[in-house]
Amino acid sequence: MGQRVRKSPIRRFFDRIEKSFQNMNLIIILLLLFPILFFILFSSLFFLFGAVLPMIFYGAIYVPSDKEKIKTIIRLAEIKPGEKVVDLGSGDGVLVIALAKAGAEAHGYEINPFLVWAARRNISKAKIGNKAFIHWKNFWQEDLSGFDVVVIYGINYIMGRMEVKLRGELKKDARVVSNAFNFLGWPQIKKEDGVYLYKNN
Ligand SMILES: C[S@@+](CC[C@H](N)C(=O)[O-])C[C@H]1O[C@@H](n2cnc3c(N)ncnc32)[C@H](O)[C@@H]1O
């Protein structure tokens, strides 16, 4: 039978200090690990939603239109008050907001739920919630026949299929404004600063 060794009060005091140091080490390690784990999780989600989702749903990854391009898009679109306009892949809503401010009833279809959330927040900050609407939708599955103007900032490999969809679905005289990428089989009406204007006929 082993005999229990009774520790002196000083020894017990030092044991307790040692134990609390061990616990503190664990807390410090956890505190250091937390931002690293958060960064890994955040980057994976960013990659998944920013790059993988658009690839799966056959669209461009998120790159916002810059201010100068937005001015050109609005100029070429020649929006009349109350016209229904849609941005296919609306990102953070910057273009939908500009279209609504130009007098349109502006809609945006967006596949990335984080961008849908960001765009709705930006719209509510801009106080134009009655004229600008963001839908968490895959634009390939939406009927575009009700729109007067379509705006798109796509990517070269979707333009052929998009041309077929737009020319088949849009009403006569509906306009299409495309940032950066042109439609190969559709004669353009105008081109300014890398932005193309088309009309359905
Ligand atoms: C190049 S960004 C353009 C963003 C915005 N229109 C602008 O000009 O600032 C393309 C956007 O399309 C979205 N997207 C890609 N494929 C999509 C799809 N099938 N349906 C809806 N949105 C899509 C992406 O998530 C991305 O936000």
Image (cartoon, rainbow, N blue to C red):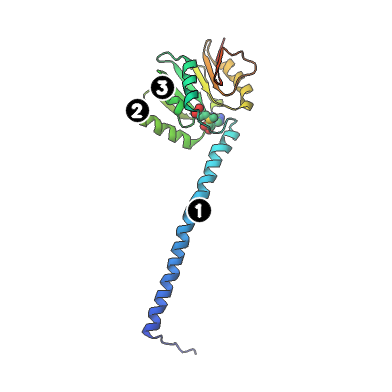
Q: Which residue is mark 3?
A: 100
Q: Is disc 2 surrounded by few (<14), some (14 to 19) or many (20+) residues within 10 Å?
A: few
Q: Secondary structure at mark 3?
A: helix
Question: Taking 68 as reference, is 54 left or right?
Answer: right
Q: Which residue is mark 1?
A: 36
Asked if residue 130 can be seen in this view, the reply is: yes
Which residue sits at x=51%, y=21%?
151
Q: Are marks 2 and 1 in contact (CB under 8 Å)?
A: no
Question: Of the residues shown, which amino acid type is indicated by label 2?
Answer: Lys
Location of the C terminus by quadrant is: top right
Of the two numbered discs 2 and 3 on the same chain, state the one appearing first in sequence: 3
Answer yes or no: disc 2 within 8 Å of ligand 1: no
Q: Are marks 2 and 3 in contact (CB under 8 Å)?
A: no
User: Distance from label 3 to label 1 (Cα)?
Assistant: 41 Å
Of the two numbered discs 2 and 1 on the same chain, state the one appearing first in sequence: 1
The percent coordinates of residue 154 (x first, y second) are 57, 26
The percent coordinates of residue 49 (x first, y second) are 53, 39
Asked if residue 137 can be seen in this view, the reply is: no
Which residue sits at x=48%, y=24%?
68
The percent coordinates of residue 82 (x first, y second) are 40, 15
Q: Which quarter of the picture shows residue 125?
A: top left
Q: Are marks 3 and 1 in contact (CB under 8 Å)?
A: no
Which residue sits at x=53%, y=19%?
177
User: Distance from label 2 to label 1 (Cα)?
Assistant: 37 Å
Question: Of the residues shown, which amino acid type is indicated by label 3?
Answer: Ala
Q: Which mark is residue 127?
A: 2
Q: Decide: is 61 above or below 106.
A: below
